[in-house]
Amino acid sequence: MTNLLELYVKLGGLVLVGFILGRKLPVTVPTRLGLFLFWVGVPISIVSFLRQSSLSGQIWIAPAIAYLAILLGAFLAWLAIKGQAYFRKTVPQPPTQASLILAAMLGNTGYLGFPITLAMVGKEYFAWALFYDLLGSFPGTYGLGVLLAARFGVGVQNHWQTAKAILINPALWSFGFGLLVREATIPTVVEFCLEKFAWCSVALSLVLIGMRLGLLKSWGSLPQAGMSLGIKMLLVPLILGSILPVFGITGSTAKVIVLQMAMPPAFGTLVIAETFNLDRDLAVTALAAGAIVLLVTLPVWLWLF
């Protein structure tokens, strides 16, 4: 309980600072901070935490489970849409359908999942969260997520731009580099500075989340967003979390996977919604409401697993 309260104080405090700054500072500040974390902060953090993580033989199961979670979320959202059409005789417009499905399948497993995993489970198991995000959630977002948006949206799909966004992602390159130098010996002072910089980047990522939430102004479409959040943050982690022992995943490792599955919708859903002219209001509402719902669901998953 003490760890959870400490987590709430740290996460809530940093997000609140970002929320206030996001309303006070120019809108260019969150963009620049996001670019700094994207190109510098997150890549260096990945290298640092990889050096302190334990890589077990089963760790490659993490991205496979991430894909299962993404597909299950999309399937359940599709069923919910079909059920709404059957029982209520109302069918959401294609852009709204796409936003509903995206919010149910894609989670914030990086900027939010990483610090929560580090705080609640520790650095030893961080590699599981890393593999889940970089080899599972990230390709799922910019692969399957973009394909879905192109199918339902009205934007122009540029296959080269999508491929380029994936290939030049510095997090993936630093992930590979971190694996190569994981056992390399470096001076103690360098190791110390690397770790401190990594933790500062984690803190800045939470501030960035607060900044972006501070810029969100729409709370419409809450009932529809609630459907996606129920699937993403309750049903999917409950269903898949209950079968993790079948894959030999138990204890702290299972906790990491469940926490990643239970994260609220990713900011990537809003980026995709804006790019392909989907339902932006629904995407915004799901993001904001999901961050609040997490405060309630987090202790439930920690207790269950």
Image (cartoon, rainbow, N blue to C red):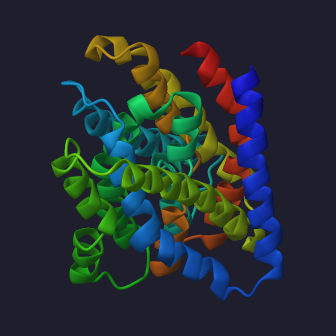
Q: Residue at x 40, y 22 (%)?
A: 253
Toward which corner of the image does residue 283 lie, by quadrant? bottom right
In percent of width and height, residue 180 lies at 16, 50
Residue 277 visible in rendering: no
Q: Nearer the viewer, residue 25 or 75?
A: 25
Identify the residue at horizontal 31%, vertical 47% (top origin). Answer: 136
Which of 279/29 is in front? 29
Where residue 109 appears, as percent x and y from the top left, is 48, 47
In the displayed structure image, the side of residue 159 where residue 207 appears, left or right: right
248 to 47, vertically: above or below: above
Please name whichever residue, 219 or 290, is drawn nearer the observer in this view of the structure. 290
Quadrant that contains the N terminus? top right
Q: In which image quadrant can residue 208 be found?
A: bottom right
Q: Position of residue 100 (x, y in %)?
A: 55, 55
- Vertical placement of 43 versus 61: above or below? below
Q: Residue at x 49, y 69 (%)?
A: 37
